[in-house]
Image: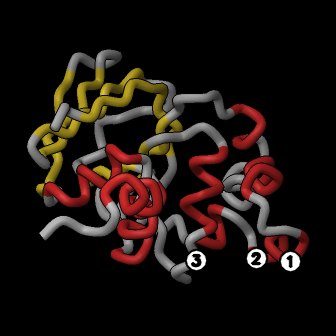
Amino acid sequence: MMPLTIDGRARRLGDDINTDYIISSTRKRETLDELVLKRYLLEAVDPALAASVREGDLLVAGRNFGCGSAMEIAATVIIAAGIKAVVASSFSRTFYRNAINNGLLPVECDTSGIGEGDQLRVSVDSGRASIVNSTRDVTVAGTTTMPAIMVEILDAGGLVPYIRSHGGFRT
């Protein structure tokens, strides 16, 4: 398995970013189409953020990212906005699994030294993550090891593409 590497610009958020902040429940009443909803990404935190997101940006947050309800649409809206990874001090367990199942890379590490706009390279090799901040010339190691099956699911683009290509889980 090849190392997974994503380069991008940091978009800095704080602690306790819940799924309703990621995409408001009032917006979900109108549609569940993530290509429409991406216009409202994190509008409760910063109304101008969605319009300023560029393909390849990375979300960087503090602790407890994705807390709140276990709705899958929170992860798919982030992906629809062109964001391929979220780096946070910690994640809600349900958001973490929803992210992986949908092909969004969640990386846990100390994010205190990452600023808005910093250029990052996020890599996962043999389940271990590292974040190189080229703006500040700092490397931070991930705080958890990702099981091989999770890396394989991410490499496939999510759980559904993984199942399609493998015909199920390998034993």
* Count of marks placed on residues: 3
Q: Earlier in the sequence, mark 2 or mark 3?
A: 2
| Residue 130 showing in the rendered view | yes
Marks 2 and 1, how far apart at CA: 7 Å
Disc 2: which residue: 25
Numbered badge on residue 164:
none
Label 3 packing within 10 angstroms: few (<14), some (14-19), many (20+):
some
Q: Residue furthest bottom?
A: 69
Find disc 3 in the rendering and name its residue.
71
Query: Which residue is at a point 46% across and 33% down the rendered structure image?
Result: 10
Q: Earlier in the sequence, mark 1 or mark 3?
A: 1
Residue occupied by mark 1: 29
Disc 3 secondary structure class: loop
Q: CA distance from mark 2 to mark 3?
A: 10 Å
Whether residue 100 is situated above or below residue 128 in the rendered picture: below
For the residue pair 88 and 123, the one nearer the viewer reads as 123
Asked which secondary structure carries label 1, the reply is: helix
Write the residue at 35% across / 35% down.
114
Q: Residues within 10 Å of mark 2 (few under 14, many from 20)?
A: few
Residue 121 % position (x, y) = 31, 26
Q: Nearer the viewer, residue 82 or 148?
A: 148
Q: Is residue 83 left or right of residue 43?
A: left
